[in-house]
Amino acid sequence: VDFLKEASFHPFLIRRLPPVLGYSVERDLVPKWNYLRKVRQYASFEISRFPAYFSYPLDRVIKCRYEYLHTRKHLPIQLIPLDEVLRYGDRDFAVNVAKDDDGSFYSAFVENRKKNQKQQSRKRRRKRQEKVHRKS
């Protein structure tokens, strides 16, 4: 509740999305809020219109879709309403928001992104292990 007050969220957020009270501030709310402020000019306004934003997975849905719109489609992400980016399932998002023909490009993007993230994770693990072995 303190985070919600500090971030100037009104009580309506709790009324419209009661589960927000059970979300982890450090793991869920703060990272999602910071990301939204990075990609949206009027983050508080967007939350007032679409508080369900906090219920979506940050990396798997939110970041993935904004990255796709920005890096692959070169669309002005500031102009696309937050609820349009998130409210659809993957295929409908790809067709209705990103304007793909059938959603296959977005599906390929998601799969490629997952592979890249796994590779990056393995590299980070190896580097940590190498550091530990060097210190030994």
Image (cartoon, rainbow, N blue to C red):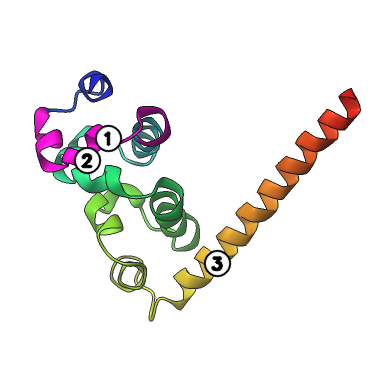
Mark 2 secondary-structure assignment: helix
Residue 39 percent coordinates (x, y): 37, 41
Question: Badges 2 and 3: C-beta atoms under 8 Å apart?
Answer: no
Binning the other alpha carbons within 10 Å of mark 1 as few (below 14), some (14 to 19) or many (20 upward) gives few
The majority secondary structure of the magenta stretch comes to helix
Q: Residue at x 53, y 71 (%)?
A: 108
Q: Look at mark 3 in the image and give the residue it sits on.
A: 111
Binning the other alpha carbons within 10 Å of mark 3 as few (below 14), some (14 to 19) or many (20 upward) gives few
Binning the other alpha carbons within 10 Å of mark 2 as few (below 14), some (14 to 19) or many (20 upward) gives few
Q: Look at mark 2 in the image and give the residue it sits on.
A: 19
Residue 60 percent coordinates (x, y): 45, 54
Q: Residue at x 46, y 53 (%)?
A: 67
Highlighted magenta segment, given as a residue range: 11-28
Which picture quadrant has residue 16?
Answer: top left
Q: Is residue 76 visible?
A: yes
Which picture quadrant has residue 68?
Answer: bottom left
Q: Nearer the viewer, mark 3 or mark 1?
A: 1
CA separation in Å, label 1 and label 2: 5 Å
Q: Look at mark 1 in the image and give the residue it sits on.
A: 22
- For the N terminus, the image quarter is top left
CA separation in Å, label 2 and label 3: 30 Å
Residue 14 is left or right of residue 43, and the answer is left
Instruction: Point out the tag, 2 or 3, that comes first from the N-terminus.
Output: 2
- Examine the rendered structure and indicate whether residue 117 appears above or below residue 89: above
Instruction: Point out the tag, 3 or 1, that comes first from the N-terminus.
Output: 1
Three-letter amino acid code at the position of disc 3: Glu
Three-letter amino acid code at the position of disc 2: Pro
Mark 3 secondary-structure assignment: helix
Is-magenta flag for residue 108?
no
